[in-house]
Image: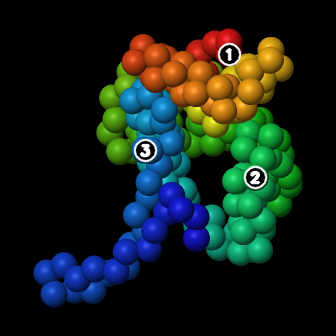
């Protein structure tokens, strides 16, 4: 279980249910990044739910578990399995998963302009390699290489983070300085 997902047991209208609460939105750092992440996630959920046979019938649990660990550890550098073959996650995202997410959003009835705007953020993020976490690491490293002590570099990174977040630009457009 990963901290951004949480099982929830609840009773509604007298019927017990178990659901997974997904916390993809806090992975921002900006509202446009959060909406892009949500559009990508929910588009993929719909596309995969509509797949026949279901993906979980095609992929052994051990492979799914391994890929979850790879993705959590390696991010955009991960090698992930698709149809029994390992692929670089950037290629898999751009060539397979983004088109699937777009189809899923179409199935939900999302306006094509909104679909393209938000999935475009993911599409631009992938080749840049710039996630919120990558930006933070890069800025702290950059500052330390230029002589800042770690604590001072963390303070400066946080200051820049807030400054850039207020611009509303997605994180892959933020400079490292």
Is residue 130 visible to the viewer in this orientation of the structure? Answer: no
What's the residue at 72%, 32% (across, down)?
A: 150
Left or right position of 73 against 5:
right
Residue nearest the viewer, comparing 56 with 152: 152
Left or right position of 21 against 85:
left
Q: Mark 2: few, some, or many residues within 10 Å (few <14, many ≥20)?
A: few
Q: Nearer the viewer, mark 3 or mark 1?
A: 1
Is residue 159 visible to the viewer in this orientation of the structure? Answer: yes
Q: Which mark is residue 69?
A: none
Which residue matches tag 2? 73
Under circle 1, the secondary element is loop
Name the N-terminal-most of marks 2 and 3: 3
Left or right position of 50 against 129:
left
Residue nearest the viewer, comparing 1 with 44: 1
Q: Are marks 2 and 3 in contact (CB under 8 Å)?
A: no
Name the N-terminal-most of marks 3 and 1: 3
Query: Can you give x and y, in whole percent of width and height, for residue 89 in the image?
Result: 76, 42
Q: Mark 3: few, some, or many residues within 10 Å (few <14, many ≥20)?
A: some
Which residue matches tag 1? 176
Name the N-terminal-most of marks 1 and 2: 2
Tell me how far mark 1 sits from mark 2, CA to CA. 22 Å
Under circle 2, the secondary element is helix
Q: Which mark is residue 25?
A: 3
What's the residue at 23%, 83% (across, down)?
A: 11
Q: Mark 1: few, some, or many residues within 10 Å (few <14, many ≥20)?
A: some
On-image quarter of the N terminus: bottom right
Query: Can you give x and y, in whole percent of width and height, for residue 113 in the image?
Result: 38, 21
Under circle 3, the secondary element is helix
What's the residue at 80%, 17% (across, down)?
A: 147
Residue nearest the viewer, comparing 37 with 162: 162
């Amino acid at each position: 279980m990963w901290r951004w997902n949480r099982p929830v047991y609840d009773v509604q209208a007298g019927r017990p249910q178990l659901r997974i609460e997904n916390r993809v939105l806090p992975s921002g750092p900006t509202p446009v990044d959060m909406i892009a992440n949500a559009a990508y996630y929910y588009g993929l959920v719909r596309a995969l739910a509509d797949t026949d046979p279901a993906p979980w019938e095609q992929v052994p649990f051990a492979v799914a578990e391994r890929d979850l660990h790879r993705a959590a550890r390696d991010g955009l550098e991960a090698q992930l399995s698709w149809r029994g073959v390992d692929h670089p996650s950037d290629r898999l995202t751009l060539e397979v998963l983004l088109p699937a997410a777009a189809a899923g959003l179409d199935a939900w009835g999302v306006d094509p302009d909104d679909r393209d705007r938000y999935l475009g953020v993911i599409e631009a993020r992938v080749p840049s390699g710039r996630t919120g976490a990558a930006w933070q690491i890069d800025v702290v490293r950059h500052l330390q290489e230029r002589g800042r002590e770690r604590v001072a570099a963390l303070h400066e990174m946080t200051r820049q983070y807030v400054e850039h977040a207020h611009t509303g630009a997605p994180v892959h457009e933020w400079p490292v300085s």
